[in-house]
Amino acid sequence: MRRVERTWLTVDFDDIRHVPTAQGHPTRSTKPVEHQGLSQAYKTGLEQFEAWLKSNHHPVTLFVIGDLLANEAFQHWLNRMLAAYDERLTVGCHGMTHRSWSAWPEDADGFSKALGEATALLKKAAGANFRPWFRAPAGYVAPWMAEVLAAHDYRVDTSINPSWLVKKKAGKGNSWADVNAAMGSSNIIERAWLTRFSLPVNGPALTLFPLSLVAKGAWKRAPPVLMANEVIKAVEDSKVGLTTLYWHVLDHSKNNGTWQPPLAQQPSAA
C-alpha cells in the first residue's frame, strides 16, 4: 500500500440550481430552480471562499461547471481570483451542466459532446491554470465514461467516493472497483475521495449530521496540504499517494457565512 503523505484540496462550484434535486437526475430532480443568475447564497460563498484563501497559503483546485462561464459576474470573479492567486489555483472540469451521467442509460456521445464544450470553455477562461482533471457532477460516474475522458485527453479523474452508502452512483450493476479499473485501462489516474470507516467525509457529509462528526475527525487527521509548486506533478503521478478532500463553495455561505473547511491548523507541506 502506498504511503499517503500529502493532501489535495479541491472545491466544487455548484450553485443551488445545479444540485441533483434541481437538475440532472432522472428521479431526484423534482425541485427545479429557475435560472436567474447567481444565487445570493452562491455570491456569499464566493465572497467567503475568497476570504478563506486570503487567510492561508494552501493551493486549491477549483472544479468548475461549464455553464457558469455564461454568467458575467462569475467570469469576472474567476478572472480576478486567477490573477490574484495564480500560483495557488488550478481549474478542473465539473461537467458542462450538473447532469448525473451514471444515473441515466449509457450515453457516450452525449457525454463526449458536453465534455468537449465544457473543456473548450474552461481552457479559454482559465488558460494555463486549466488542467485535464475531471470530477463527475454529484459523483455519478460509470465505467463507460473512462474511454470518453481519455478521448478528450483527460489525465485524472476524481469522482469516486468509495463508500457503500453511495455505491449506486457507479451505475446499475457496477461497483467502484469497476469504475477504478476502467479508468486504469484508459490510462487515467483515479484520485478517489477520502472516507473513514467506509463512510463519506467530503461534500455533503461535512454538514450532514451525524456524518459531519466523522468527517471533521477525518479532516483533522489529514496529512499536510501540498505546496503550490507540488500540485500538478503530484496529482498527475500515479506513484504519489494523496488524500483527496473536497467541499462546495456554497458551504462557505453556511452558518451566516462563517463556515470554513475543518482542516487542522497546519502549514502546507514543506
Image (cartoon, rainbow, N blue to C red):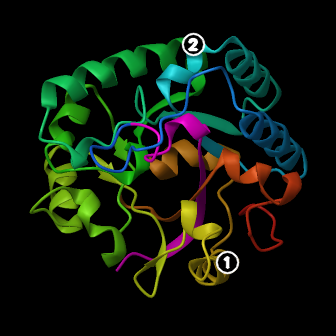
Mark 2 crowdedness (10 Å alpha carbons): few <14, some 14-19, many ≥20: few
Q: Work out whether 135 lies above or below 98.
A: below
Q: Which mark is residue 105?
A: none
Q: Is residue 34 left or right of residue 184?
A: right
Q: Specify the quadrant of the image occupied by residue 146.
A: top left
Quarter of the picture holding the C terminus: bottom right
Q: Work out whether 89 lies above or below 73.
A: below
Q: Which is nearer the eye, 60 or 30? A: 30
Residue 241 placed where, x, y %? Answer: 45, 66
Q: Does the magenta stretch include residue 15?
A: yes
Which residue is denoted by mark 1 in the rendering? Answer: 216
Q: Which mark is residue 70?
A: 2
Part of the protein shown in magenta: 1-23
Q: Is residue 189 magenta?
A: no
Q: What is the secondary structure assignment of the residue under circle 1?
A: helix
Q: In this view, does 75 lie to the left or right of 204?
A: right
Residue 222 placed where, x, y %? Answer: 63, 75
Label 2 and label 1: CA atoms lie apart by: 35 Å
